[in-house]
Amino acid sequence: MINMEVNIAGIKMKNPVIAASGTYGFGREYGQLIDLNELGGISVKGLTLKSREGNASPRIVETSSGILNSVGLQNLGVEYFLENELPFLRKYDLAVIANIAGNTEDEYCEMAKRIGNMVEGIELNISCPNVKEGGVAFGTSADMVFRITQKVKVNCSVPLIVKLSPNVTDIKEIAAAAEAGGADGISLINTLLGMAIDIHKRKPILANIVGGLSGPAVKPVALRMVWETANTVKIPIVGMGGITSSEDAIEFLLAGADAVAVGTANFVNPFAPIHIVNGIWEYCKKNNLKGVRDLKGMLIDK
Amino acid sequence: MFNKKCKVISNHEIAPSIFEMVIENRDIAIEAEPGQFLHIKVNSGSDILLRRPISICEVNNDNITIVYQIIGKGTTQLSLVRSLEFIDVIGPIGNGFPIDKEKKCAVIGGGIGIAPLLELSKRLKNCDAYLGFKADAYKIDDFERYCDHVIVSTEDGSSGNKGYITDFMKHIEKYEVVYTCGPKIMMKKVKELCHVLPSVTCYISMEERMGCGIGACLVCTCKTINTDDSKWHYKKVCTDGPVFHAEEVELSD
């Protein structure tokens, strides 16, 4: 019997695989193709205090083994989520994590208060590269990360996971600031800021000019950052960035992640999260491990 | 909507850079409506990561025909798939064309945009087709089989009339419903022609770069106007569309 359960700072999940924010909506669409009960959790599409229309199209461009997106947090607001989307997700056995993004520190606090304990956890999105105000602006200096984490934590009734941006000089410093500010967990990485140009029109392809890179192309960068973070903080880590297969997910777990999130891979294969859960189970069995939690710290890097 | 491995029955070039592929899947074929699309994984590697949205051209029993143009890496890869191989397909997806069989209709297509209009023509009773191409015309025989009149134009005059198809639509007021798919500039002209005629309802099939293709990721949005309060919103081309009421959708961008 292999124990696939994980506990991320008090967020209990039956397996370590989460659908990553922004790639899975609120579960309804993928729920037509897969059984959402198979997921450990879902981090819902980034929520803002008021509804947002997002950026102009094109919002996506395919790059080598990856995609750039610039959605810009299009959503109908936190109230709409609580009234119309959360009840749907409650029909399923999975942890619901509310990803929140604000223009100001007060907006983050207000959202955390409003959500209360209606979800299992809150993911503090201070790493969205596609909005003019807020977003990644809060996530690139250690002082700012410390401050906003501390402020939101006071208003938060459930475990608080801080989602970090890879667009920083030293991820260790940022992760330590989140931990010092009172974060219960850390998730990383959000997308890497990138760009693509149409050489025939001599114009950027994205209407927003720049966007966030995700998919297999970013995996080595994400893995390195998760490993560095795991060597820096004691709080649990949700690792993500280009995870497509169970082998990818196991790399993140060995590097020090307690759970993983699957994002872009869903677009390619809606069954990817389920295949990843099964693959991790098989790996544990083959290696005579009692459970998925045994993987953390098993990396032989010294 | 299903996610199926579909057997490729045939895949060949019908005009320069234009391919016709027939795939077999009963579940998708039964559910498919004209105007819907399939989201196709063109190969198993990760270099061409995303699926490609391709509209349904025709349905015959368990077979679905798609017609696509080679534009980039993804469609090039798709053109290399051989008969009897299997491709991974999600579909059918999206809102198709609303159909009222009793009405007098016109389908107006430009280039590869003619593809979703074929199955539509087949399901309409009183339908004329206006089909515009740059140079080589294709699928004309099929439209002639299902439509009362087929008007063709090419920019170089190699088939049908010489010029843009919108130049040959003189009496649009005789139609009750107009369906259009093709280049934005053509659809914009069709929308303008219909806009001044209150008796004509116009439907437009939109295209945009897509991600998940099933409504979750919000990357394929187009600008729409709420006709009740005149406020604009971004809607998803994949599942709010791809077919929209012409008055709802903004084509200026």
Image: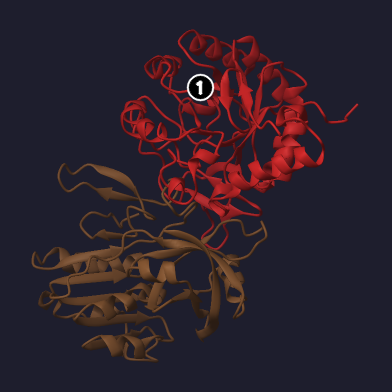
Chain colours: A red, B brown
Residue B56, percent from left and from top: 40, 71
Front in this rendered view, residue A197 or B47: B47
Give the residue displayed 39% in from the left and 55% down from the top: B238
Q: Kindly identify which residue carries mark 1.
A: A121
Residue B134, percent from left and from top: 41, 81
Q: From this view, report whether residue A73 is shown above or below residue B116.
A: above
> Mark 1 is on which residue type?
Gly
Q: Is residue A191 left or right of residue B169?
A: right
Give the quadrant of residue B168.
bottom left
Residue B239, percent from left and from top: 36, 53
Give the residue displayed 54% in from the left and 82% down from the top: B10
Which residue is most to the right? Answer: A302
Q: Count up the numbered dots.
A: 1
Q: Quadrant of the N terminus of chain B?
A: bottom left
Chain holding disc 1: A
Give the quadrant of residue A289.
top right
What element does badge 1 sit on?
Answer: strand
Give the quadrant of residue A150.
top right
Front in this rendered view, residue A47 or A107: A47
Front in this rendered view, residue B209 or A43: A43
Residue A8, percent from left and from top: 61, 22
